[in-house]
Image: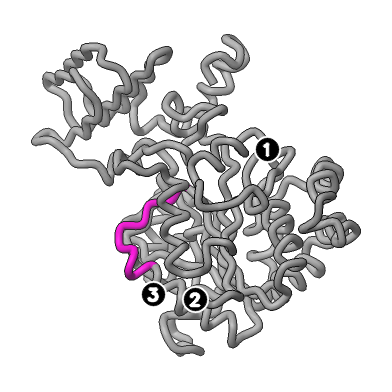
């Protein structure tokens, strides 16, 4: 296994879109939300041990999740868990990992991935990543994985290519033309019908040199904050330095800060059974259904005239539901959510209102 290959797993999210199962103290990446016997973080870590040495996998997460990360990943040591003192989006998270890796191996080739994605065909995924690693090893570029869309979906960002241009490289790799944030349904339909768009997976590959050069040119404020303390990384003074850097960091995504602006961005089109598991509805799509297209997970659940609904319960409480169509029902020890699937985007509002009116007890 190539010792120059590193993986950065981003695991700091609060997971509010999976409330009430996901809570701020125990968000979705630390849950076995698919019922497979492993949490999403554990599945992600195991997946990448097929690609790079386990000791080269870094987990970037919130300081409050240090203990649960080490508990769920006994294969790693404490130095592999990078602790963010505050949430500042993905660009500072990736900058932190870059400067740590720079002290360990300046020749590193890096994969950056979220901790909470579903990958159904892991063999194809591993082959795709290996193709990408070869590409970024041979070319001065930034590479993202694009997923061939199966439907118009307003929950994903989109990556446009120019299909009339010939492939510049082997495999399905093309220069990126544009990035588009989550579109409305009419635009999503146009994107899919055009055949020129991929879903943006949020999985990136690059050499350490190329991503550092991009930060220096496109996000110099963030780059300089870290660079001023570069000698502190991979030392006993690293956490103190990070605690001093983060309050001054911009809250900005890697997509907006670098990928949408860099001139050397390419996309590798792939299909390996991917979902970002960002919502209850996306989870519903991957669950087994009954004869009425209901996805049921839990004990003592009885449904009458219920269709196209996900029902999840973490207690043994008897739950009887009649007459619901296209809903999300989630029952826990201290909370019950009943929400129309078409209104699921309001979950963030619900969580904010709960925090304002009921305090942190239920968040």
**Residue 338, percent across and down?**
35, 20
**Distance from Cα at disc 1 to Cα at disc 2:** 31 Å
Q: Residue at x 57, y 40 (%)?
A: 13
**Location of residue 214 with respect to 344 vertically, above or below:** below
**Which label lies toward us, 3 or 1?**
1
**Which label lies toward us, 1 or 2?**
2
Q: Which residue is mark 1?
A: 63
Residues in magenta, as a range: 116-125
**Location of residue 206 with respect to 349 vertically, above or below:** below
**Residue 209, percent across and down?**
72, 76
Q: Residue at x 79, y 46 (%)?
A: 239
> In this rendering, would 327 be left or right of 180?
left
Query: Around disc 3, counting alpha carbons within 10 Å, would you say few (fewer than 14), some (14 to 19), or many (20 or more)?
Result: few
Element type at marker 3?
helix
Element type at marker 2?
loop
As drawn, the residue found furthest toward the right would be 228
> In this rendering, would 80 be left or right of 249?
left
Mark 1 / mark 2, whichever is N-terminal: 2
- What sort of colour scheme is used for the picture? one colour
**Residue 162, percent across and down?**
48, 78
Residue 190 shows up from this direction: yes
> In this rendering, would 335 be left or right of 246?
left
Q: Which residue is mark 2?
A: 1
Q: Which residue is mark 3?
A: 127
**Location of residue 91 with respect to 301 vertically, above or below:** below
Kindly check if marks 1 and 2 are in contact, taking CB atoms under 8 A apart as contact.
Answer: no
Whether 183 is among the magenta residues is no
Kindly check if marks 2 and 3 are in contact, taking CB atoms under 8 A apart as contact.
Answer: no
Q: Quadrant of the C terminus?
A: top right
Tell me the number on the disc at residue 286: none
Query: Around disc 2, counting alpha carbons within 10 Å, would you say few (fewer than 14), some (14 to 19), or many (20 or more)?
Result: few
């Amino acid at each position: 296994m190539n010792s120059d290959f590193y993986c950065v797993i981003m695991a700091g999210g609060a997971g509010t879109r999976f409330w009430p199962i996901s809570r701020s103290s125990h968000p979705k990446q630390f849950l076995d939300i698919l019922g497979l016997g492993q949490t999403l973080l554990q599945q992600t870590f195991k997946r990448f041990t097929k690609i790079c040495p386990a000791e080269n996998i870094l987990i970037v997460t919130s300081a409050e999740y240090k203990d649960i990360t080490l508990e769920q990943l006994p294969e790693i040591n404490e130095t592999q868990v990078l602790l963010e003192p505050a949430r500042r989006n993905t660009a500072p998270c990736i900058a932190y990992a870059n400067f740590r890796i720079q002290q360990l191996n300046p020749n590193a080739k890096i994969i950056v991935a979220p901790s909470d994605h579903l990958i159904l065909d892991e063999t194809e995924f591993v082959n795709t990543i290996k193709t990408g690693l070869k590409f970024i090893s041979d070319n001065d570029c930034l590479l993202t994985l694009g997923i061939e869309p199966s439907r118009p979906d307003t929950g994903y960002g989109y990556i446009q290519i120019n299909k009339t241009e010939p492939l510049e490289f082997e495999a399905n790799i093309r220069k990126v033309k544009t990035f588009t944030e989550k579109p409305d349904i009419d635009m999503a339909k146009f994107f899919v019908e055009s055949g020129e768009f991929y879903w943006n997976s949020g999985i990136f590959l690059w050499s350490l040199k190329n991503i550092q050069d991009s930060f220096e040119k496109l996000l110099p404020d963030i780059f300089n904050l870290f660079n001023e303390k570069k000698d502190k990384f991979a030392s006993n003074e690293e956490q103190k330095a990070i605690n001093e850097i983060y309050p001054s960091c911009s809250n900005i995504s890697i997509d907006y800060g670098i990928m949408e602006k860099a001139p050397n961005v390419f996309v590798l089109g792939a299909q390996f059974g991917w979902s970002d598991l960002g919502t209850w509805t996306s989870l519903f799509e991957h669950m087994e259904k009954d004869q009425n297209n209901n996805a049921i997970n839990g004990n003592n659940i009885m449904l009458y005239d219920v269709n196209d609904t996900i029902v999840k319960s973490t207690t043994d409480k008897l739950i009887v539901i009649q007459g619901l169509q296209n809903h999300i029902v989630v029952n826990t020890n201290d909370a019950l959510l009943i929400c129309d699937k078409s209104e699921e985007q309001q979950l963030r509002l619900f969580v904010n209102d709960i925090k304002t009116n009921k305090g942190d007890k239920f968040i």
